[in-house]
Image (spheres, rainbow, N blue to C red):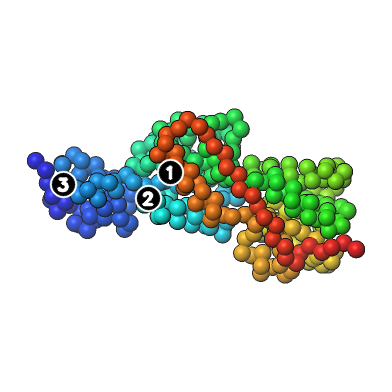
Amino acid sequence: MAISAKELAQILNLSPAAVSMALNNKPGISEKTREMVIAAANQYGCHLTRKQESSLGKSIRFVIYKQHGEIVSDTPFFSQMTEGINTGCRNAGYELKVSYFYEHENRDEQIRALADTNCKGMILLGTEMSREFFQPFSQLKIPMVVLDTYFEELDCDSVLINNVHGAYMATNYLIENGHKTIGYLRSASQIGNFAERADGYYKALRHHKIHTDHPYVHRLTPSMEGAYADMKHILAADPEIADAYFADNDLIAAGAIRAFKEFGLTIPDDVSIIGFDDLPICEFLEPSLTTMAVPKQYMGELAVERLIGKMNQQTPVFIKTEVSAQLKVRESVKKAE
C-alpha cells in the first residue's frame, strides 16, 4: 500500500521538510540523505506529483579530478568555469552536483561511487588527468563530456582551449613588437594544456626562423608564490635574460615579474612579459599584464550544452570543441626600438 510523504518522513526519522527537499530536488540536504529518501520512496510506493517524478535524477554531476592540486585549485580560472557550468545547468533545468576525484585515493571505490550516483550526465574536469587514468571513466554508463583536456587515443567528447594557437599568438605578438630574444617561463608541472602551449611557443619561433635552442627557458612552479621563489633562485645565478618572455599562465608571469623587479629589472623597459588565462590579477599588477584571455565561463556553458545534446541524442559520434584565446593588450609588453 502506498504511503504519504509525511509517513515516509516518520519511517526514515527525518523531518517532513527534509523529505520534501529530497523529493522536489531542492538544495539544503546532503546527497546521501537525498538518495536514501528517493530509494525509500520507490520502495514504499510514496505518492509523487508529476513535478516530483520528473525532477528525480534530473541532475548533472561535475567531477573535479585532482592529481596534485598544483593546477586545479580555488582560483578565479576554475571558479569562473564552474559558474558557467552552473549557469548552463540552471538554464536547462538541471541541478548541478559537484564531486572530487583524488588520483591517489582508492580509484575503484571512487568509480563505483560515481556509477551509483543518480545523475543524467557527467562533466569531468580533466586538467590534471593523464591519459592512463581516464580509462576507468570511459567504462561508466553515463553520458560524459571531458572539460579542459583531450586524449588523442580515447573516444570522448571534449571542450578545451586551443592552447597551441593561443601560445603561438602570444609569442608572435612579442616578435611583432620587435623583440629578438623570446624566452619561455614554462611550468615545472606538466599537464596537457602546458604541453600544447609549449608546442605553440616553439611553432611561432620556427615560423619566424628564430633558434629554438637557447638559454631562455626557465621552469617555474605554476603558482604565483612558487614562480616567484623559483625565479629568484634562477636570477641569483646571473643568467642571460631574454628581451621578452611568454609565460604558461598568469600566475607564473606574476611571480616572475616580482622576482625581476627585486633584481632591478623594469617591466616592460628591460623585460616584456605576456601571460595566459586573463585572471583578474592581471589588471592589478604593476604594470598590468598583457595576456591571452580565455572565455572560462563560456567553456563551462558549452560543456553543459554538449552534454545535454549527448544525453538527448545518444549518438556514437564524439566531438572535440576547441575555444580560442584572445589577445588582451595591457602594459607589460613594449615595442622594441
What SS does tag 3 mark? loop
Contact check, label 2 and label 3, Cβ < 8 Å: no
- Residue 41 appears at what percent x and percent y? 20, 44
- Residue 27 appears at what percent x and percent y? 33, 56
**Residue under circle 3?**
47
Outermost left residue: 1
- Whichever of labels 1 and 2 marks the residue nearer the N terminus, that label is 2
| Residue in the image at 73% along x and 42% along y | 199
- Residue 126 appears at what percent x and percent y? 55, 43
* Marks 1/3: CA–CA distance: 29 Å
- Whichever of labels 1 and 3 marks the residue nearer the N terminus, that label is 3
Which of discs 1 and 2 lies nearer the camera? The answer is 1
Using the image, determine if residue 262 lies above or below residue 297.
below
Quadrant in which residue 319 is drawn:
top right
Quick check: 18 left or right of 97?
Answer: left
| Label 2: how many Cα within 10 Å (few below 14, some 14–19, many 20+) | many
**Residue under circle 1?**
308
Which of discs 1 and 3 lies nearer the camera? The answer is 1
| Residue in the image at 74% along x and 48% along y | 168
Decide which of 42, 91 is in the foreground and name it.
91
Contact check, label 1 and label 2, Cβ < 8 Å: yes
| Label 3: how many Cα within 10 Å (few below 14, some 14–19, many 20+) | some
Decide which of 248, 230 is in the foreground and name it.
248
Quick check: 228 left or right of 313?
Answer: right
Give the total of numbered labels: 3
Question: Is there any visible trace of residue 306 in the rendered image?
Answer: yes
Q: Which mark is residue 94?
A: 2
Q: Which mark is residue 208?
A: none
Q: Quadrant of the C terminus?
A: bottom right
Q: Amino acid at mark 2?
A: Tyr
Q: Amino acid at mark 1?
A: Ile
What SS does tag 2 mark? loop
